[in-house]
Image (cartoon, rainbow, N blue to C red):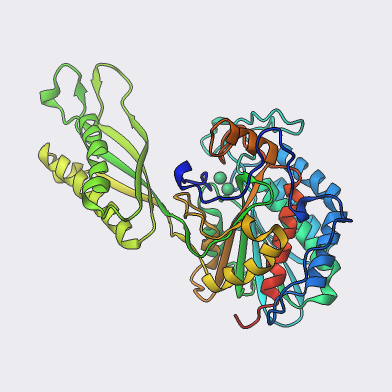
Amino acid sequence: MQEQPGVSPEHDPMSIPYPSQGETVTQPESVRRDTAAPAAPAPAAGAGHADAALIAKVKAEIDADAARLTGIFKDIHEHPELGFMETRTADIVARELKALGFEVTTGIGKTGVVGILRNGDDPTVMYRADMDANAVEEATGLPYASKVRGHRGDGKEVPVGHMCGHDAHVTWMLGMAKALVAAKADWHGTLILVGQPAEELGAGAKAMVDDGLYERYGVPVPDYLYGLHTAPLPTGTLISGSGARMAGTDLIDVTFHGIGGHGSSPQTTKDPIIMAALAIVEYQMIISRAIDPQEAAVLTVGSVQAGNDNNVIPSEALVKINLRWFKPAVREQLVKGIENINRSIASAYGLPDHLLPTMTMKGSVPPLINDASLVERINVPLKRELGEQRVLTDFPALMGSEDCQMLMGDKQSIKLAYLQVGTAPPKIFAQARAEGKFIPFSNHNPDYQVDLDAIPLGAKLAAVGVLEMLASPTL
Ligand SMILES: [Zn+2]
Ligand SMILES: [Zn+2]
């Protein structure tokens, strides 16, 4: 999912000096391919922080592996797979992790993969990469662009493209895995790497947990869960804030039942299209009149389906609703409001009880909430990596949603850090800014693209965060 950063330009918190058009793009230390560049300053002597020499070693491993990782990325990009169909991608993850000595289990939650590396005492860190692509026709024009077409459950042919960067997420995980294995004498703990299916459907993480991730498959309950997502900010920037970072969401189908008939004789019918139309307008009153204006809430009707002919009143109308919210009490208001409006409209039309509107709750994902102490801790080495001002700690929360946090299941002790990694090519970003655009493209756009320089960089940010967590046994 991961909709675009939802902030308006006037609230642009990124006070980073972006290169203007024609200006040389200076990338941060870690992005430069020149490994002879001066080393990053030594870390502050913070108690228990990840060892700077170890971080440097792991980064050098990733730099040496950059060409191979770019090849893996392009290969996955060219072969995208829709949610719960990621068999080829899962095979790549399984093969790579097995070769590195991980205990690998496949087929968790249909196409999920888990690799475990037990390397001494606590702590246990879980890193998650989602694997699925979008039903979007790629229009980047890149030489490795997807030309794939696939089928959804309904058999309909759709284009398939990695327009949310999950191909990068998988590659980052594999790059980090290799580097951490090479340096495993220098750290201890249990590393769990998760190739998760179907994030775009909001269902993959739950499917893995429901399939018995922690029970049937015996995956250790981690102390920390870490996830990274691409974002259309310039390579070398990172959003790493505490607290609620992404909204909760619900998918709700409402069916208005009526009595169909001839279009010329409405008096003999109960017209479900009229009821749906009224409801769609009234739903927005929940947002504008019922919910505290200081609370964030979105109600979008994304699909209305009813009837076939000009002169036939159908017997049903289907309305597909999407909610976004941060507080459970707001969600409650939204759901109750929808129920009340449905009932009142049906009642005004004199529908019998057996024809009252029905609601199907198709799925709910809670907001994503980052643990403040964990984020504060990992931001220390991440800021050292990218530069203080390129780690955006007060970037507003997004109304987009994620299901990474669902990997926790009911294990409330797990601390989560989920960060957004800038992966837009800096020149393209600067060009967009020069044209007055806030960002050059959004996740899911046909022209969404991940900078190849962000491939080794993302692997490093994954490794740096994991090493910091592995060095944090008592947080
Ligand atoms: Zn997405
Ligand atoms: Zn995504």
Residue 349, quarter of the rendered image: top left
Query: Residue 43 appears at what percent x and percent y?
Result: 74, 72
Q: In the rendered view, tell whether residue 468 sits above or below residue 266.
A: below
Camera-side residue of 304 and 32: 32
Q: How many numbered marks appear?
A: 0
Camera-side residue of 388 and 146: 388
> Which residue appears at 82% of the width and 57% of the height?
62
Query: Residue 446 appears at what percent x and percent y?
Result: 60, 32
> Which residue appears at 62% of the width and 72% of the height?
377
Residue 344, quarter of the rendered image: top left
Which quarter of the rendering shows the C terminus? bottom right
- Is residue 350 toward the left or the right of residue 63 in the image? left
- Is residue 267 toward the left or the right of residue 166 in the image? left
Q: In the rendered view, tell whether residue 338 sits above or below residue 187.
A: above
> Which residue appears at 10% of the width and 39% of the height?
348
Query: Residue 298 appears at what percent x and percent y?
Result: 35, 47
Residue 161 seen in the figure: no
